[in-house]
Image: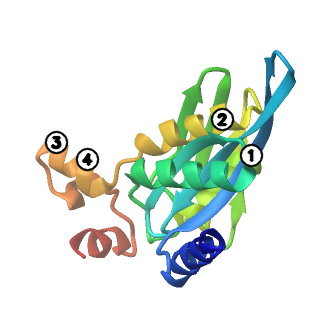
């Protein structure tokens, strides 16, 4: 009788702590290993985790049961978080291209009100990252694992004007184009 109580208390502990991360299940795959007595089934899960403030990660977990595979994938995703600079906390600073194997994706910045125009695995990554305006296009394989990795390759290439200015030993104001209304100069100073 002690065992069911332990499981219940473990579940209670897990649900009580408020998580700062948003977790999205991208894909579940049933895989089979052929053994002497027949086939042994297990499940592979692909999870994306993000704080919707510029940090995102993905993980892959495999287990005999679906919940255990999801738990493993979530833990791995939390270990592999990357930080992506966002413009105005809503979109990317510049267009990007990512490739992983046959998976190729293209990300483009978008004006306010556009929303997340992307499909499947790419949408899960962008929403957990906290982007609200972006256009994404998958150009190659639709394999979710390759699409997620290609999306991460495109996001790793993102640079903010501040990062570029630091690399080039210049001021941010020197990099941004001058506009007639002077919005670029006030944005750079802040």
Label 4 element class: helix
On the image, which quarter does residue 31 sit in? top right
Horizontal arrangement in the rendering, residue 153 relative to residue 36 (left or right): left
Instruction: Identify the residue at image location x=64%, y=52%.
Output: 68
Image point 58% across, 63% down: which residue? Answer: 128
Residue at the extreme right of the image, as rendered: 38
Q: Is residue 139 visible?
A: yes
Q: Are marks 3 and 4 in contact (CB under 8 Å)?
A: yes
Say what secondary structure mark 2 lies in.
Answer: helix
Mark 3, residue position? 168
Q: Residues within 10 Å of mark 3 (few under 14, many from 20)?
A: few
Q: Camera-side residue: 173 or 100?
A: 100
On residue 164, the disc is 4
Which numbered mark, 4 or 1, is in the foreground of this view?
Answer: 1
- 180 is higher (above) or lower (below) than 94: below
Q: Earlier in the sequence, mark 4 or mark 2?
A: 2
Closest to the observer, 25 or 82: 25
Q: Which label's residue is closer to the chain start, 3 or 2?
A: 2
* Residue hosting label 1: 27
Cα separation, mark 2 vs mark 1, equals: 8 Å
Q: CA distance from mark 3 to mark 2?
A: 35 Å
Asked whether residue 118 is in view, the answer is no
- Separation of residues labelled 4 and 2 (CA atoms): 31 Å
Where in the figure is residue 63, as x and y percent of width and height?
A: 66, 42
Q: Report whether 78 appears left or right of 64.
A: left
For the residues bearing labels 2 and 1, Cβ distance under 8 angstroms: yes
């Amino acid at each position: 009788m002690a065992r069911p109580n332990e499981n219940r208390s473990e579940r209670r502990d897990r649900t009580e702590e408020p998580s700062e991360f948003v977790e999205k299940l991208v894909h579940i795959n049933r895989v089979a290993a052929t053994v002497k007595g027949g086939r042994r089934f297990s499940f592979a899960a692909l999870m994306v985790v993000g704080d919707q403030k510029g940090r995102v990660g993905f993980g892959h977990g495999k287990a005999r049961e679906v919940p255990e595979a999801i738990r493993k994938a979530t833990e791995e995703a939390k270990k592999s978080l990357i930080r992506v600079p966002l413009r105005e906390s809503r979109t990317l600073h510049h267009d990007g291209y990512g490739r992983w194997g046959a998976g190729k994706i293209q990300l483009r910045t978008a004006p306010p009100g556009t929303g997340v125009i992307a499909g499947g695995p790419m949408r899960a990554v962008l929403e957990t990252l906290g982007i609200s305006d972006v256009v994404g296009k998958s150009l190659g394989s639709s394999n979710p694992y390759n699409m997620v990795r290609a999306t991460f390759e495109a996001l790793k290439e993102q640079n903010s004007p501040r990062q570029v200015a630091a690399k080039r030993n210049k001021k941010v104001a020197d990099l941004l184009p001058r506009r007639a209304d002077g919005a670029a100069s006030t944005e750079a100073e802040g």
